Image (cartoon, helix red, strand yellow):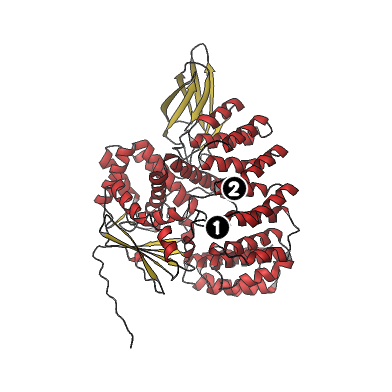
Amino acid sequence: DGTRIFHWYQQLPHSNYLFALYVGQYEPVTLRPAFGIIPLTVWVPPGQEDEARRVFERTPDMIEFFSNRFGYRYPWDKYDQVSSYDYAVGAMENTSITGHNDRIMRDRFQLEEFNPDFSHYTSNWTAESIISHELSHHWFGDNLTSRSLGTIWLNESFASYCMMLWDEHRLGREELQAQTWMALQAYLNYVRTQHIIRPLEYRFYDSREEIYNTETTYLKGGIVLHMLRWILGDDDYFRALGYYLHKHEFSNVESTDLKTAIEEATGKDLRWFFDQWVWGGGHPTFEASYTYLADQKKIELKVQQVQPLVEGQGLFELPVEVRIDANRKTKREVVWVQHQTEHFSFDVDGKPDLVSFDGRGALVCDLQFEKEISELLYQLAQDELPGRLWALHQLVQRYASNPSTLSALSNVLSSSAYWSLKAEAALQLRNIHSPEAEKLLLDQLRSTDYHVRKAAVIALGYRFTDAAKRALRRVIDSDPNNDVAMTALVSLSKIDRSLTVDYLESHLRRTMWYDVNRLAVLTAIQNLADKKFLPLVKEHASLKYNYAIRQQALNSWAACAPADPELTDALMTFAKSDILPVQTTALELLGRLKSERALPLLDELARTNGDGDVRKAARDALQEIQRMNTR
């Protein structure tokens, strides 16, 4: 009668949450076997085979790289990857088969980033980093599995750093520095805006999302592991991780297992490090200053820790590299910061041109270091990439009106500097309000690097000039990268309220990767917040579109017509019957819009839904509405 029975024998032990079945009409794409013996297959819908070969072509190289880097061969019989429509998370590392959201698929002319994002010119999450992240879980997560969600950092922080290691291997040291710098900025911005610090190992949470927090568990955890690498040195660090993998293979692990394994492999006591960075929360904020003592040919560096001293975040103890450039010579010294206030003395050959505090970006810290413009200009030109990025920000924050700052940004943009520095320089032009800065910004629309062009169109969204509006319209119509073109549309919606329904509708007729044009049009409508766009919005609150579009349609609808009874109906429907990201968006909006009609539904979901994240979102919405009624 057409029944088929499949048998699968898994020889090695693995964790039960890593079982998966993918059922659908898929075509296999065979990749080069890793080490010549490990079969690798990608499964995609018919017609996407050529895209799959391009997107996943480096998978065998990744398997061989991680195997060699950690001294532990990929353990499973094979490795498959599947592209699935509306996959509710970005990807999932099931044992020997990873599921990917179908936005992983793109042609050779599209952006490197995994997600459409109209606010940032890049992110840590490229399509390739997602592939390497999920693959690396087969060492850290599928082989060694954290014992509980409280220690999930042992899975996710490691995978997040592994994707940075792959970028370093393929693209070089500056790419690693760019990745760690971006991760640090994302984490610091999260702490500043959300006012939340917590340890990496954390057992007090109401929903999974609190522990699967991108900025802390993934990005901070990744750069904490990078910091440990710098402290131990490459030889000890990678040898210790190989020892950890062999000692605990195919078992559950706790943070103490990692600590003990590294100590056994290196002979170094790491209690201080784990106390601060795994079991403690937060990060140090350093306030640095120095005095040049010409008669003694010395400088005295003063370092203070000025972060709030609260429970869970005290003083930190860690090494810092200080770079001093003087009289055309460079010296580097490593000092240990252990107290709230420290004084360090260094011999110099003359007045320093630069005193750089962690210019290589090895530490997880915030730095306050007031400098004269001359030193910042020198640092922007001469330091390592993280130090140059820091100096760039300081110049724009403190000396935006100084002509030397604009000249320095112009020099960066016309130089052979690494792409991330040039893109950041283009973005920071939004904070310099002069016709010369705008002309320099418009010039970047001709850059050959799409990151720089995208940074420029984001920055133009802060300029309410006719020249900016005309330039954005040209980019929308002509840029070869769809993401840059559609970011320009979103930027235009911030500065031009004359956009019409017909104009936006014309861009809906374009064909783009992951329907990024529809996502951009809906985001622009959210910015414009005008009821005349409602027919376009309502059309997209439908299961015929991917879940990112459904989410954005609901947010845009709420911006245009928050009191629309149809919106409440739609939110209640999606809260009951869509995938998790759309459900939680709908629930959040019901709470924010104080939808009393939704109270019975919210109460039911809060009590009975089988997903803890849905129950938490429903409780939060319920409390938001009830709080209004008690005032």
Element marked by disc 2: helix
Q: Are marks 1 and 2 in contact (CB under 8 Å)?
A: no
> How far, Cα to Cα, is label 1 from label 2?
15 Å
Q: Residue at x 69, y 41 (%)?
A: 438
The residue nearer to you, when weighing 285 against 178, is 178
Q: Residue at x 35, y 49 (%)?
A: 255
Q: Is residue 498 left or right of residue 607?
A: right
The residue nearer to you, when weighing 8 against 198, is 8
Q: Quadrant of the N terminus?
A: bottom left
Q: Quadrant of residue 415?
A: top right
Q: Is residue 66 left or right of residue 415?
A: left
Residue type at mark 2?
A: Arg
Q: Is residue 116 visible?
A: yes
The residue nearer to you, when weighing 189 against 310, is 189
Element marked by disc 1: loop
Percent across and percent down for residue 421 are 54, 40
Q: Is residue 623 above or below residue 241?
A: below
* Residue placed furthest toward the top: 295
Q: Is residue 630 visible?
A: no
Q: Quadrant of the C terminus?
A: bottom right
Percent across and percent down for residue 49 are 42, 66
Circle 2 crowding by C-alpha within 10 Å: few under 14, some 14–19, many from 20 = many
- The residue wearing badge 1 is 116
Circle 1 crowding by C-alpha within 10 Å: few under 14, some 14–19, many from 20 = many
Residue type at mark 1?
A: Pro
Percent across and percent down for residue 469 are 71, 51
* Residue placed furthest toward the bottom: 1
- The residue wearing badge 2 is 453
Q: Is residue 138 above or below residue 256?
A: below
Percent across and percent down for residue 479 are 60, 54
**Which label belongs to residue 311?**
none
Camera-nearest label, 1 or 2: 2
